[in-house]
Image (cartoon, rainbow, N blue to C red):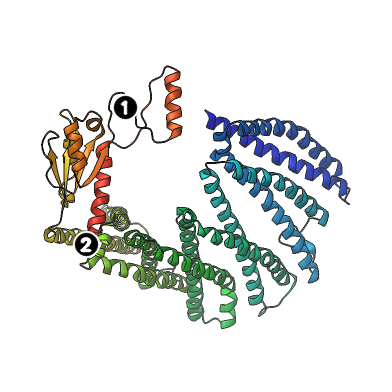
Amino acid sequence: MKTIQRIYLYAVSLISMEVVLWGMIGLARSIFSDSSSGGVSQLSQALALILVGVPVFGIHWWAAQRSANQDEEERSSGVRALFLYAVLLGLLIPFSQNGLAVLNRLVTNLFNIPSSRALIGGYQSLSDNLIAALFNGFVAVYFLNILKKDWLEVSNKAALTLTRRIYRYIWVLYSLVMAIAGVNQILRYIFSLASIGGVYENALFANGLALTLVGIPLWVWAWKVVQDSLSDPAEKASLLRLGILYFFSLAGVIFVLSTTGIVINEFFQMLFDRNTFAAFFIAIDEPLAIAIPLGAVWAYYGHWLQRDLAALPSAPRRAALHRFYYYILSAIGLVTAFIGLSMLLAFIVDAALATSVYKSNRLAESLATLFVGLPLWLFTWQPMQAKALSDDEDAEQARRSIIRKIYLYLAIFAGVVGGMVAAVQLISLLFEALLGSLPNNFTRDLLNSLQMLILFGGLLTYHWQSLRRDGLLRSEIKGKKVDAISVLLLDTENGTLSNQLASLIGADDAEINLIPQNPTEEFPTADAAILPQSLLLDAPEMLRERIRQFNGSKLIITDEADDYFVMENVAQIKKSLLQLAEGEEIQRAKKSPGWMIAVYILAGMMALQILFFL
């Protein structure tokens, strides 16, 4: 209930704050504006925004602040942290944009270009931007002070830390996009020098220069803040950082490969149509202007991704994340190569039949797609396949990797479904011919359906064989393994834990030797013991002594013991006490069954012992 109340208060506060802010900006602009057009309308709208927004914001922000001052939990809530950092984004980004608009018009004027050609704020005035920047800046200072106070007074800073981390990476993304756009505009101007210049081309340079002058320093500052925060181990190990590095690296390589395909396509079209090199260069100037900055992004963030992965202390996790990167690129390369090959075969069919759709640009497009996709797939798939086919422990990790299984099953799924569609089309054409209704372009459609069936069949066969080979190698290695962990399973008389675990741990988990153990008898030597919580709570002294003397790992499973409730944190304790105070039964937290937790823990132990990583 409190969470819903918080969301309501802070959502209305955010919206009404923006209403009041832009009402004040509109009022100030109408006062200082030199233009008389729209003055009454602008003034009326600004006054309306202020009159409506002020009471709404005042009431809701006062209520939110009062709750935060009275309750530590309220002040440290994730909703409040999200509100404060969202407000700062909503204030400081417009502040930056208005500064960029002023600089953009200044640069265009320096090059004797009309201000209307400015990419940002082309139809605004200096007073418009200064007023918006000042008001956004003043309000941002107020909320910055509120945020600093929260950081000083809040003891549980988990929500603030996570939200600040997201906030910092949003600034990195925002400034990086601005810098890329600026470099792109400048490169387009440079490449256009070979053609006849004009106001448009000069505006490209002016706009690009303005974006670069703001974007690059802003990105350097934002990225430095992120890098400086890595002294905190939590920041360095955050999944958000890893996800951002993956996103930047993969986005860079995808864009670079796409533009590479465009360049190859234009090159083949130049060869086939006998165009001039100048025409070829003009055709690829925009793709190159995109590829160069994004290639730099790929190289830079790919470098940091590799450094972060190399710094991971866990070798299995490091290998798994490395595989994730390679399998994504391999999937992209496989799809691209498949499309390129199907396009090439379709072109060959049309060329052999001399149909009207024979065009050289189709050949260029198919070759470009194939030349981009096939090397990418080979470069990324071959190392993964070679690792999986080797006979060391790392190879077993690679074969059992969930990422590899997803990749193989997706390829098999595509092969089956695509093959079904192609087979339906092929058989449908044959039936139409047998029934005497020969369709137009029958031979072409028949051959195209046949080539698609062959391609999907090849895709299915190759990846099915890879999956089957993984299973065979795994069986061979299991036959050679002699090491296994022995696990004692203690259960109550009426317990179902033994049956559940026995059914779950089957032939696939031969490394786990599960031994049912009577709690009243002496414990044999074992690597681990599984102990239900209900058995421990009522255990006699003799059993307690045996458990204390047991040298293996002890896995305790929470179960539904009457009148015993396991509390995960103080928030759950508070919630349970309130339920008792209101005459309600304590609701047990919904979680995985105890036997499932035991299996997870056993799998983790097995992973540590034999270096399996799923």
| Residues at marks 2 and 1, CA–CA distance in whole angstroms | 52 Å
Answer yes or no: is residue 353 visible. no
Residue beneath the point at 15% across and 53% down: 484
Q: Earlier in the sequence, mark 2 or mark 1?
A: 2
Is 13 on the left or on the right of 165, as rendered? right
Q: Nearer the viewer, mark 2 or mark 1?
A: 1
Is 240 on the left or on the right of 225, as rendered? left
Is 588 on the left or on the right of 108, as rendered? left
Which mark is drawn over residue 340?
Answer: none
Query: Residue 70, image x and y in percent?
Result: 61, 31
Q: Residues within 10 Å of mark 2 (few under 14, many from 20)?
A: few
List the residue tagged with mark 2: 465
Using the rendered view, name the quadrant where residue 345 is placed: bottom left
Q: Nearer the viewer, residue 119 or 194?
A: 119
Residue beneath the point at 70% across and 41% down: 18
Answer yes or no: is residue 488 visible. yes
Q: Nearer the viewer, residue 145 or 338?
A: 145
**SS assignment at label 2:** helix
Query: Residue 5, image x and y in percent?
Result: 57, 30
List the residue tagged with mark 1: 564
Using the rendered view, name the quadrant where residue 217 is placed: bottom right
Residue beneath the point at 74% across and 39% down: 20
Residue beneath the point at 62% across and 43% down: 84
